[in-house]
Amino acid sequence: MNRRAEIATLKSTNPCLTLQQIGNKFGITRERVRQILVKERTSTRRPNYGQYSKICPMCKKSQIRGKTILCRSCYHHMHTVPLSCELCGTIVYRKQSEVIRDFAKANYQHIWCSKQCQGKWFGANFGWGRK
C-alpha cells in the first residue's frame, strides 16, 4: 500500500485526526496531507462535535453531547434508579437526585409508571366505587 492510500485510509478510519497529526506521523506537512486527500477525494474536514471530539470514559464511544463527560446512555445509567410501579410492576427509571430528595421529605411514598396507574390506585384506595 502506497503512502497516499495509507493517508486516505487513516483519515477515513479516524476522521478526528487533524491534518497536522497525520503529517507528523508520515513526516510531511499538513498542506501536503491536504493535497493528497484532495487527490484521493477524501474529506479534509473534521466532524463537527461541538468544539472538539469527546470520548465517553465508560463505554469508549465517541459522543455528541454538550458539556457533560459521559455519553447519553452512560449518563442515564449513572444518574437514574430503577423503581417498580406499585400497581402493575413495570420497571420505571427516575432521576437519582429526585428520588433522594422526595424520599428524604417523606412525601414520595408511592411509585407509579403512568397517570393511568396512579388513577387506578387512587380509585381503589380513596373512592370511586369504594364502600
Image (cartoon, helix red, strand yellow):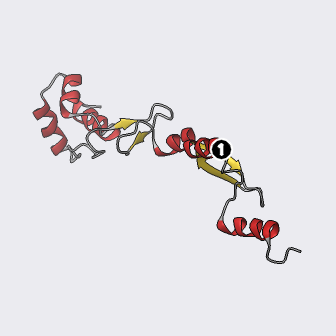
- Choose between 21 and 56: the one closer to the eye: 56
Q: Position of residue 36 (x, y in %)?
A: 16, 38
Q: Position of residue 32 (x, y in %)?
A: 12, 33
**Residue under the point 85% across and 74% down:** 130
* Res 37 quadrant in image: top left
**Residue under the point 18% across and 29% down:** 20
| Position above or below: 33 against 50 | above
- Choose between 43 and 56: the one closer to the eye: 56
**Residue under the point 70% across and 54% down:** 111
Query: Crowding at label 1, few (<14), some or many (≥20) Cα neighbours within 10 Å?
Result: few
The C terminus sits in image quarter: bottom right
Q: Position of residue 61 (x, y in %)?
A: 45, 38
Residue ranking furthest to the right: 131
Report the residue marked by disc 1: 103
- Choose between 125 and 63: the one closer to the eye: 125
| Position above or below: 38 against 18 | below
Q: Disc count in the image?
A: 1
* Res 122 quadrant in image: bottom right
Q: Position of residue 73 (x, y in %)?
A: 52, 45
* Res 7 quadrant in image: top left
Name the side, left or right, on which 82 lies relative to 7.
Answer: right
Label 1: which secondary element: helix
The N terminus sits in image quarter: top left
Name the side, left or right, on which 80 lies relative to 85.
Answer: left
Amino acid type of disc 1? Phe
Name the side, left or right, on which 63 lies relative to 117.
Answer: left
| Position above or below: 68 against 107 | above
